[in-house]
Image: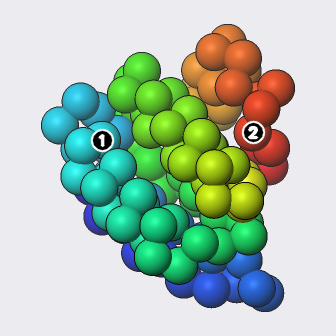
Amino acid sequence: MNIDIISENGTAVAVLKGEIDHHSAKSAREQLDSFIITMQPDVLAIDLSGISFMDSSGIGLIMGRQKLLKECGGRLEVRGPQPYIRRVLRISGIERIVRIT
């Protein structure tokens, strides 16, 4: 998986590309946590539009970053998930704690 973090209108946007599974989630967690702790953004948007596959590791990835951001005084958004990924997110109930657009 590839992650690029850009600034877009004052919001940090982590653009993820590839697949989120058990193996790739670990690397993504490390990269995102390092960014969150170092930069402490008010808002971090995770852009999933480039994700072709996601299993339950993706749910864990999102939940953990939400928790860390909340501890740092920020908030998390999820952007552009493919329809089947949006369905997985909805079934997990994550949309009750994270804004999905």
Circle 2 is placed at which residue position? 98
The quadrant of the rendering that contains the N terminus is: bottom left
Residue type beneath disc 2: Val
Residue type beneath disc 1: Ala
SS category of the residue bearing label 2: loop
Residue at left offset 72%, top offset 60%: 74
Label 1 packing within 10 angstroms: few (<14), some (14-19), many (20+): many
In the image: residue 70, left or right of residue 4: right
* x and y percentages locating residue 57 in the rendered image: 37, 28
SS category of the residue bearing label 1: helix
Q: Is residue 10 visible?
A: yes
Mark 1 to mark 2: distance in Å?
18 Å
Instruction: Please tell me the numbered disc located at residue 77.
Output: none
Q: How is the image coloured?
A: rainbow
State which tag comes first along the sequence, 1 or 2.
1
In the image: residue 8, left or right of residue 49: right
Residue at left offset 62%, top offset 86%: 7
Label 2 packing within 10 angstroms: few (<14), some (14-19), many (20+): some
* x and y percentages locating residue 66 in the rendered image: 62, 43
Q: Vertically, is 36 above or below 9? A: above
Q: Are marks 1 and 2 in contact (CB under 8 Å)?
A: no
Circle 1 is placed at which residue position? 25
Of 75 and 89, nearer the camera is: 75
Q: Is residue 17 visible?
A: no
